[in-house]
Image (tube, grey):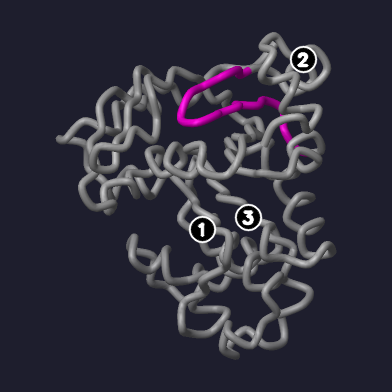
């Protein structure tokens, strides 16, 4: 059994110009679990994730219909306040993009925007979230050095700390380990497993082994259509759809 669903997608259709990227998607994302969205390249995984935080709005000539409910709010409603929606979502991209400032300022940036000004409070926030992201021991003595000096793996963990510092409900990861070395990937995966006690985590991955390791729930897309969704153990051990069986066996890509 899965827990309460935090995100519900109803009849979601997305077109780029005349090309249908997502076709009548209906799915649920369970609360405080890790959900993996899987499928071959070009099947709509990233588009689906972008619909969760309204980044899809920035795509030129996009047409959207349907609903995405988060905390019983349809975030695709034209009246929905986008800044408020995005504050709920911490986002990790494939490649880390630290801000062009110090390690400390990267983490403090979001809390400052949302009104936190006291140095002691900011110090506590920066330390706490760097610890949560598994980075504190590596950077504690160089907080005021440029974030650009960090390794790619460290930068990704810094971006995770920066996203968590604004206290989101949901962490979105668009292939968040694809640019990382194996050790850094393990760091991120270990952190995700710990964070799911407090956050709903949704990752896009094309690596079935990673989905098997991490996911509590799996969503399988193929050519813009939802083929199957369900608890990870059931999905991988007893898939219901023939296409899912073939994909899990590596027979289609």
Mark 1 sits on what residue? 163
Mark 1 vs mark 3: in front: 3
Which quadrant of the structure image shows residue 15?
top left
Q: Is residue 49 magenta?
A: no
Mark 2 vs mark 1: in front: 2
Residue at (62, 31) in percent of width and height: 32
Determine whether, in the image, residue 17 is placed left or right of residue 119: left
User: In the rendered image of this protein, does residue 70 appear above or below residue 98?
Assistant: above
Q: Label 1: state its secondary structure.
A: helix
Residue at (64, 69) in percent of width and height: 127
Per the model, the C-alpha gap separating discs 2 and 3 is 25 Å
Identify the magenta region: 214-229
Q: Label 3: state its secondary structure.
A: loop
Q: Position of residue 197 (x, y in %)?
A: 68, 36
Which quadrant of the structure image shows residue 31?
top right
- Nearest the eye: 159 or 61: 61
Q: Earlier in the sequence, mark 2 or mark 1?
A: 1
Residue density around tag 2, few if under 14, some if 14–19, many if 20 or more, within 10 Å: some
- Nearest the eye: 94 or 131: 94
- Nearest the eye: 41 or 134: 41
Instruction: Return the mark for residue 234.
Output: 2
Q: Position of residue 151 (x, y in %)?
A: 70, 79
Residue density around tag 1, few if under 14, some if 14–19, many if 20 or more, within 10 Å: many
Mark 3 sits on what residue? 176
Are the residues flagged by discs 2 and 1 in contact, CB closer than 8 Å? no
Q: Earlier in the sequence, mark 2 or mark 3?
A: 3
Are the residues flagged by discs 1 and 3 in contact, CB closer than 8 Å? no
User: In the rendered image of this protein, does residue 199 appear above or below residue 7?
Assistant: below
Q: Is residue 224 magenta?
A: yes
Which quadrant of the structure image shows residue 210?
top right
């Amino acid at each position: 059994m899965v827990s309460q669903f935090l995100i519900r997608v109803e009849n979601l259709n997305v077109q780029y110009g005349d090309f249908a990227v997502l076709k009548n998607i209906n799915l649920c994302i369970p609360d405080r679990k890790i959900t993996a969205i899987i499928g071959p390249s070009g099947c709509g995984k990233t588009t689906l994730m972008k619909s969760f935080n309204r980044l899809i709005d920035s795509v030129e000539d996009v047409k959207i219909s349907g609903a995405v409910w988060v905390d019983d709010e349809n975030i695709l409603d034209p009246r929905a306040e986008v800044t408020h929606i995005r504050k709920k979502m911490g986002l990790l991209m494939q490649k880390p993009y630290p801000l062009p400032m110090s390690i400390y300022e990267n983490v403090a940036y979001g809390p400052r925007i949302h009104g936190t000004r006291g140095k002691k409070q900011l110090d506590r926030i920066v330390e706490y979230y760097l610890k949560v992201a598994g980075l504190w021991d590596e950077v504690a003595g160089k907080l005021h050095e440029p974030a650009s000096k960090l390794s790619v793996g460290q930068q990704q963990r810094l971006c995770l700390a920066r996203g968590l510092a604004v206290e989101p409900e949901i962490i979105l990861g668009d292939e968040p380990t694809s640019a990382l070395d194996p050790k850094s990937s393990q760091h991120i995966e270990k952190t995700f497993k710990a964070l799911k006690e407090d956050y709903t985590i949704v990752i896009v991955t094309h690596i079935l082994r990673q989905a098997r390791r991490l996911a509590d729930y799996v969503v399988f897309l193929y050519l813009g259509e939802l083929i199957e969704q369900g608890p990870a153990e059931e999905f991988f051990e007893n898939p219901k759809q023939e296409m899912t069986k073939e994909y899990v066996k590596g027979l289609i890509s």
